[in-house]
Amino acid sequence: MNQRSLVKSGALAIVVAIQSLTLVSASQKTWAPPRTADGQPDLQGVWLNNAATPLERPRALEGRSRLTPEEVTEFKRRAAVLLADNANDFAAGDALFLAVLANVERYKSRNSTGGAYEMIEREFDNRTSLIVDPPDGKIPWR
């Protein structure tokens, strides 16, 4: 390539870059989150949480914010056993985690309307509660 070709290709690259920046800045608009009537962020909608992690830390896991990888593997195994048996009741909310923690053979609920076949697949991770602050994993009641 000669010097004139390099200058032309360099100038072309600069023009393309400037046009790209102009297009990006023109397409970026200020976004504001939707608000409720009283001005709070509007978080209404359908929320799906597949985590089996309980909201508050169970008493049996006090002082522990995490499970070991071996415990997570064991919890997954226990959950698979419970979910495979349609004689078990639907375990809503924290119930599946607590049943797995207690290592029950059969889960029965006073509030259930059907079997475990109605449950969505839950994901187990190493957290012992969704609450991380305060460190005790409990909702701070005021």
Image (spheres, rainbow, N blue to C red):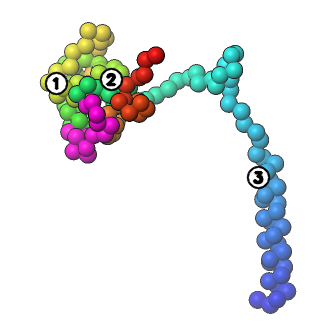
Q: Are marks 1 and 2 in contact (CB under 8 Å)?
A: no
Task: Tell me the distance, in whole angstroms, between the alpha carbons under discs 1 and 2.
Answer: 14 Å
x then y, percent, for residue 86: 22, 22
- Rendering coords of residue 24 (x, y %): 76, 52
Residue occupying the point 23% across, 36% down: 75
> Crowdedness of circle 2 by 10 Å Cα count: few (<14), some, many (20+)?
some
Rendered image: mark on residue 104: 1
Q: Which kind of residue does numbered mark 1 sit on?
A: Val
Question: What is the three-letter code of the residue carrying label 3?
Answer: Val
Q: Which mark is residue 94?
A: 2
Q: Position of residue 133 (x, y in %)?
A: 43, 32
Are discs 1 and 3 less than 8 Å apart at CB? no
> What is the secondary structure assignment of the residue under circle 2?
loop
Question: Where is mark 3, residue-wise?
Answer: 24
Q: Is residue 50 left or right of residue 21?
A: left
**What element does badge 1 sit on?**
loop
Q: Tell which circle, 1 or 2, labels the residue nearer the N-terminal end.
A: 2
Q: Residues within 10 Å of mark 1 (few under 14, many from 20)?
A: few
46 horizontally vs 17: left or right: left
Q: Residues within 10 Å of mark 3 (few under 14, many from 20)?
A: few
Which image quadrant is residue 73 in?
Answer: top left
Magenta stretch encompasses residue 71: yes
Q: Is residue 125 left or right of residue 12?
A: left
Q: CA distance from mark 2 to mark 3?
A: 45 Å
Seen as rendered, the residue at the extreme top is 110
Task: Please report the residue visible at 81 percent of the width from the left and 48 percent of the height from the top.
Answer: 26
- Regarding residue 48, the answer to whether it shows in the image is yes
**Bounds of the magenta span?**
61-74
Q: Amino acid at mark 2?
A: Asp
Q: Residue at x 76, y 89 (%)?
A: 1
Residue at 82% x, 60% y is: 19
- Sequence-first tag of 1 and 3: 3
